Image (cartoon, rainbow, N blue to C red):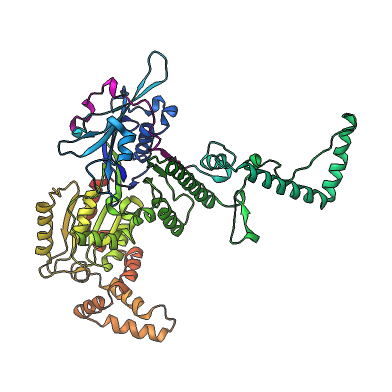
Amino acid sequence: MNILIDNVRIAGFRGIENIEISLPRVAVLIGTNNSGKTSVIKALQLALGDYSRYLTDEDFYINSEDVRSEKILVDVRVIPVKKDDSRLQIFGDDWAQEFEDKIQAEANGDQFLAIRTIAEPDKIKGGFSIERFSLDQWADFSTWQDEKTRKKQQIRRRYDALPFISIDAQRDIHQELKDKTSFVGKVLSSVEYDESDVRQLEKMVAEINQEAVEKSEPLKGLKKQLDTLNQSFEGTGQAELTPFPKKIRDLSKRFSVNFGESEKNSFSMEYHGMGTRSWASMLTVKAFIDLMARKHEEEVIPFFPILTVEEPEAHLHPNAQRTLYQQLINTDGQVIISTHSPYLAGMSYLNGIRGLSKKSNNVSATSLMPGLDPEDINILHREIMRFRGEILFAKALILFEGVTEEQLVPAMFQQYYGYSPFAIGVNCISVAGKNYPPFIKFACSFGIPVCIVSDNDGSTKKEIEAQVDKIKKDAGLPLDSNIFALQFLGDNNDIEAELINALNLREEIVEALIATETRGSLNTHYISAKTKEIELLNDEQLLERMRSSKASYAGFLSDVILRNPNNKKKEGLVPVALVAAFKQIEGWLKL
């Protein structure tokens, strides 16, 4: 039977004034730098691991009035779960024996273990006082800090069955091989052989050492000279050269890891780049966890490690990041990853992502809103997670129907402001039709402001407004101006009609279509003929040509808009609806 830390609450720690985060078995923490990802991990380490020895005054929260918090609180809740991580009512016998009388039950009979960690400055002895208690109940979040602890509920030991294992952002197996306290050092220190194996192995090593000396003239000469030491020891004694460790217990002192495409071209880790060394370091942690799991299994003791990994993507190319992510999530126990990588975030399940942000001197957490139907989830995984994981890190989104706008809007934004929307964290996304609801729900779940710039042909406006009203009603999202905006192109216009009829970008469009249809040809006669053909088209014919080529012409038109060969004012190159969207984003991002 499995368990799970399904909820953590933190108050007064680093930049966190008061926060609650739900945790699945695999949680991926995302957010900008200084958003609180590391703080959440270190708070868990304080509650379950060894962070208490690293605690400093700087770990105590300082509010906007420069007042330092008097104490740090970290509450974690452990629950029993099935293999699919759905909640069970009671703990299995093994965990019941481990947690003993600390287990409590809710009114409906659902059992849990709640552990509170309290850190305070020790005004008498100096340093800090760290105490842990079990709680009688898991109170409502609004009153959780008021929950009282009792001395008889104090927890005076670590739960060895629930080890906290942290992989920091700075890691290097080459350095860790020299450190007995590293994870690879702990694996090596656990190496044991029985006496008969030790005798056999040491005999083999002795023979290898003897042969290595005999086949080397420099070593034979060295031994001959060192043997004369016996002149100082009354003619007795001899020197023994050991190119290889003489005793099996000393093997780890010269232990090395080599890696390459084959045995013939493998190299020591010190000659590999930081990507390989970092990756190897993380894999040694998996080896350590496997070792611990076997020992617990032999002793019939439950085992559920909590593994946290900071920025596992460091120094790795995208495919390597994806492979490493799969290796990490297949680790026993619970895995919590903090990342800035869209590739890692895109590999994760939407319901496992936790967005962290810092506003008004406090860290807040977001997650995917409940109530999305399976088709919404499939669309988001297909359209966003698989190919556009960077959207999770966006500061604002502009949504529209098609791929034409997806190419044009960034160019129009850059022409209008002088810099790319991506430079300020604004992503421009096609929803491939009119299926805006899952994208709206996704963005609002993670606190990402979203603006729709919709076509306005046929019944499109009514359809989109009905979608928005339904989201407000069914999902309970306010969709107010702080996070949502909706703009429409001119009456009866799709994007092509807007460019021709509203903006009168005929010259720019003609240039783009010529480039589209000649496709880099150097044949001047062909180019001249195409130019004449397209220039003779009237507006309706030009519209048909644009709609038939769609995404093809959009890339060329984007280039023309950026170059602005006709020196038009920027307002004359951008639809009114898009200008309104840009202004809305200005306000959201305080540009």
Decide: is 457 above or below 238: below
Which residue is at a point 53% across and 36% down the rendered structure image?
181
Task: In the displayed orientation, state which residue is furthest to the top.
Answer: 124
Q: What residue range appears in magenta?
A: 142-169
Q: Is residue 569 visible?
A: no
Most foreground residue, 259 or 359: 259
Q: Position of residue 479 (x, y in %)?
A: 15, 50
Most foreground residue, 189 or 302: 302
Q: Position of residue 523 (x, y in %)?
A: 43, 84
Q: Position of residue 498 (x, y in %)?
A: 19, 68
Location of residue 441 (image quadrant)? bottom left
Which residue is at a point 39% across and 21% down the rendered structure image?
128
Horizontal arrangement in the rendering, residue 491 relative to residue 4 (left or right): left
Horizontal arrangement in the rendering, residue 250 relative to residue 137 (left or right): right
In magenta stretch: residue 82: no
Which residue is at a point 22% across and 79% down the rendered structure image?
544
Location of residue 323 (image quadrant)? bottom left
Decide: is 206 above or below 137: below
